[in-house]
């Protein structure tokens, strides 16, 4: 039993995953979250197990990171769903998931500090000693994990997007994200759009389901997906380039409104002027649920990534790990849980003075972490996104035979690497 | 890693100010020329305000006419002025930490001298107390009509703690004409249901004029704050003081904050701002102070935790 403290900054999927792993490895864990809810963008996401994410989910489960996937599976409104470019997706209910994850963390004995905003680091000889909070207090620890994400705050969404669109991150209420790695003296990497400008828009908006016609609502409840053609004059293919989620940057997504049932009606487009949206049959009364100004813009992401190695340790700081979007140009909950879990596990390995784990490239979860790290060094790599769910990386998974929906085969793969349940081997 | 501080003017009708245009904003990293956000949050995004104002700065403070209706020598070279001025200005000065720039009406702009607002009366009058010391203050002596520029608000460092403390005990330690800054904050403390202990050291004078403006329920202890150090520490411990406001010279602040740090770590501190304020707009640079390594702070606009400034 060890009791050294791991401090995690940022309570999104990556931070929650890191907290669970560090706690189960025996550390005292403090999770700092600036808003009043865990999961961050996970409160408006919901897409799991689509395409290569299925493989990655099962790999994570066999590695021992099963807890959060059990919750997302349990709260799925739809399973084994196909929609354009995507197969066997699960859609979890965004209106129910956060309290369940919060209960899990609290029951595990993780100290969850909500409405506490990190504002600075106390650092000595490249070793972080504590995190200064906005209330003048300091949270001291031995190892730190940054999962603050790369989205916002307001000034960034303004300069690189269309202004604050009032998203779930709620910067005006809870204050801005800061970069722990940058406060520690390590310059952030910044992702780019295809035209070379900084950042990228979040890829979807959510409509209030009750504002849709009863036909659409019923079809969503029943089938999980509704596809509505966009009037010709409103098709803008160029908008796809500005999108984070290149797995959804397909022609079908410009020519159609694709709605998915995540509790809200998740609309797979960055933003869509309200008056144009209401021209579409069944959407005459539509209104946005997230971001509130989804007719104008969306949150801007990838503005703050830390250079890291493949154990998730931040290069240049002795005791800082990272996960989620902070750790690279990753998209999605599965990717956040993948990187967050490894960071959480390795934080305790570091406390113990043991060799840090690098996931092998014979697993999709290991390959994506290494591949992203190679690509991000190139200018073109900064314009790409990395996700099991589509685009370049899913093609790579297929090329390398990493994509599989055969659960036994995936288990065998993890076993052959001698990593079965590694995350829980204390 | 940028140098960002809270700005007293952030979110006010004077923000964004000239410093946004010259990329020297106190709070916003992007308005300091950086590519991305890194601010300590003022409850408002200054870059957004700047864009919303079509990248123009807001118009600055106006100059109002002031008529001296009372000029009373309280002690040798110490004067109290009662000044009649514009109602709008008086309204804006009704805030802890407020001050104005004063000069005789026909004098050049460089005679402007910063003065803490001692108290307000009705909706047309305010009081100041000053000591005849240099050419700026001496030039006020015979003035009957004044130019008043304002309002300015950064007369107290750590002012944010005032909002956070209620139903608690507060200690105010003041010396000499430092008492000119205590009346408005004490009223605010009382409004927030706090119990007030006032340690008053008259310094080299025999004055306790601030008491004439305070009629609420407060415990006044008179003494010498250097000789009575232990007494002050006992006051803090025995009354479980949550907030200490030191109003006097920087020597006084150093002494008091040292006393506090010796007895209890988690006490909020406020200090009167004694910086060499000149233009009050962050432009001239006369009040710049270096805190920690390489951090230059414009003290006329920046809010800094007093514990980082003293001892």
Image: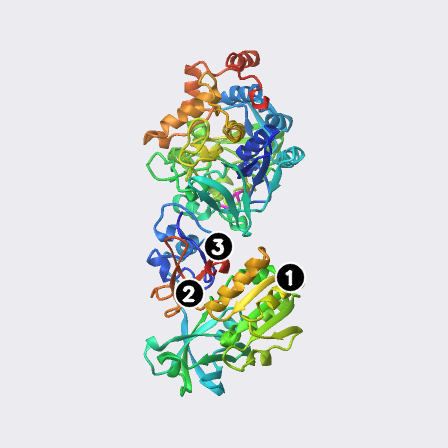
Chain identifier of the residue bearing label 3 in the image: B
Residue B255 place in picture, x, y as percent: 51, 65
Label 3 sits on residue: B44
Q: Are marks 2 and 3 on the same chain?
A: yes
Residue A196, image quadrant: top left
Picture disc at residue B237: 1
Of labels 2 and 3, earlier in sequence is: 3
Q: Secondary structure at mark 3?
A: loop
Residue A168: say if magenta.
yes
Question: Mark 2 near mark 1, Cβ–Cβ under 8 Å?
Answer: no
Residue A241: say if magenta.
no
Quadrant occupied by the C terminus of chain A: top right
In the image, the segment drawn in magenta is: A165-169
Residue at (40% x, 52% y) in the render: B3
Q: Secondary structure at mark 2?
A: loop
Distance, label 2 to label 1, CA atoms, is: 33 Å
Front of the two marks 2 and 3: 2
């Amino acid at each position: 039993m060890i009791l050294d403290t791991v401090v995690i900054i940022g309570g999104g999927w990556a931070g929650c995953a890191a907290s669970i792993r560090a706690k189960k490895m025996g550390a005292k864990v403090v999770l700092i979250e600036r808003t009043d809810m865990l999961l961050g963008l996970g409160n408006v996401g919901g897409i799991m197990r689509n395409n290569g994410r299925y493989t990655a989910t099962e790999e994570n489960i066999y590695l021992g990171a099963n807890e959060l996937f059990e919750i997302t599976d349990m709260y799925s409104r739809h399973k084994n769903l196909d929609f354009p470019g995507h197969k066997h997706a699960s859609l979890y209910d965004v209106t129910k998931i956060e309290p369940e994850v919060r209960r899990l963390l609290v029951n595990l004995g993780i100290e969850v500090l909500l409405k506490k905003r990190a504002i600075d680091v106390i650092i000595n000889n490249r070793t972080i000693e504590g995190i200064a909070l906005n209330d003048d207090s300091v949270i001291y620890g031995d190892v730190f994990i940054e999962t603050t994400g790369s989205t916002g705050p307001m000034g960034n969404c303004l300069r690189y997007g269309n202004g604050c669109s009032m998203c779930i991150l709620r910067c005006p209420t809870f204050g801005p994200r800061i970069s722990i790695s940058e406060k520690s003296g390590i310059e952030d990497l910044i992702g780019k759009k295809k035209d070379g400008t900084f950042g990228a828009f979040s890829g979807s908006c959510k409509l209030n389901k009750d504002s849709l016609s009863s036909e659409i609502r019923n079809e969503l409840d029943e089938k999980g997906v509704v596809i509505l053609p966009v009037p010709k004059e409103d098709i803008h293919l160029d908008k796809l380039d500005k999108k984070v989620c290149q797995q959804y940057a397909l022609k079908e997504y410009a020519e159609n409104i694709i709605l998915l049932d995540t509790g809200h009606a998740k609309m797979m487009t960055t933003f869509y002027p309200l008056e144009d949206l209401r021209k579409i049959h069944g959407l005459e009364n539509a209104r946005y649920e997230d971001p509130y100004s989804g007719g104008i813009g969306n949150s801007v992401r990838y503005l703050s990534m830390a250079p890291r190695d493949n154990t998730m340790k931040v290069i240049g700081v002795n005791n800082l790990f990272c996960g989620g979007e902070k750790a690279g140009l990753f998209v999605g909950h599965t990717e956040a849980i993948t990187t967050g879990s490894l960071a959480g596990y390795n934080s305790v390995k570091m406390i113990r003075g043991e060799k840090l784990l690098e996931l092998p490239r014979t697993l999709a979860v290991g390959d994506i972490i290494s591949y992203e790290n190679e690509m991000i060094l190139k200018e073109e790599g900064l314009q790409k996104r990395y996700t099991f769910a589509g685009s370049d990386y899913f093609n790579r998974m297929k090329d390398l035979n990493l994509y599989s929906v055969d659960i036994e085969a995936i288990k065998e793969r993890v076993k052959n690497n001698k990593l079965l349940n590694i995350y829980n081997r204390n | 890693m940028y140098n960002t501080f809270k700005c007293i003017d952030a979110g006010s009708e004077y923000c964004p100010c000239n410093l946004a245009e010259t990329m020297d904003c106190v709070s916003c990293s992007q308005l300091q020329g950086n590519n991305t956000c890194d601010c300590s949050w003022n409850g408002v995004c200054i870059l957004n305000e700047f864009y919303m104002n079509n990248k123009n700065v807001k118009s600055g403070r106006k100059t109002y006419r002031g008529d001296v209706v009372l000029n009373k020598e309280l002690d040798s070279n110490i004067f109290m002025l009662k000044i009649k001025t514009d109602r709008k200005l008086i309204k804006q000065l009704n805030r802890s930490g407020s001050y104005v720039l004063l000069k005789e009406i026909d004098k050049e702009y460089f005679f402007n001298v910063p003065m803490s607002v001692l108290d307000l009366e009705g909706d047309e009058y305010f009081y100041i107390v000053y000591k005849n010391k240099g050419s700026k203050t001496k030039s006020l002596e015979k003035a009957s009509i004044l130019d008043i520029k304002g309002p300015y608000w950064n007369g107290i460092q750590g002012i944010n703690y005032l909002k956070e403390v209620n139903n608690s005990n507060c200690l105010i330690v003041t010396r000499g004409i430092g008492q000119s800054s205590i009346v408005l904050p004490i009223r605010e403390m009382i409004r927030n249901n706090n119990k007030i202990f006032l340690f008053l050291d008259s310094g080299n004078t025999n004055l306790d004029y601030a008491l004439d403006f305070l009629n609420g329920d407060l415990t006044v202890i008179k003494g010498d704050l250097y000789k009575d150090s232990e007494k002050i520490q006992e006051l803090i411990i025995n009354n479980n003081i949550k907030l200490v406001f030191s109003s006097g010279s920087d020597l006084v602040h150093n002494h008091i904050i040292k006393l506090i740090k010796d007895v209890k770590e988690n006490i909020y501190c406020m200090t009167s701002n004694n910086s060499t304020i000149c233009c009050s707009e962050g432009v001239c640079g006369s009040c710049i102070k270096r805190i920690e390594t390489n951090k230059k702070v414009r003290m006329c606009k920046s809010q800094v935790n007093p514990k980082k400034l003293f001892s």
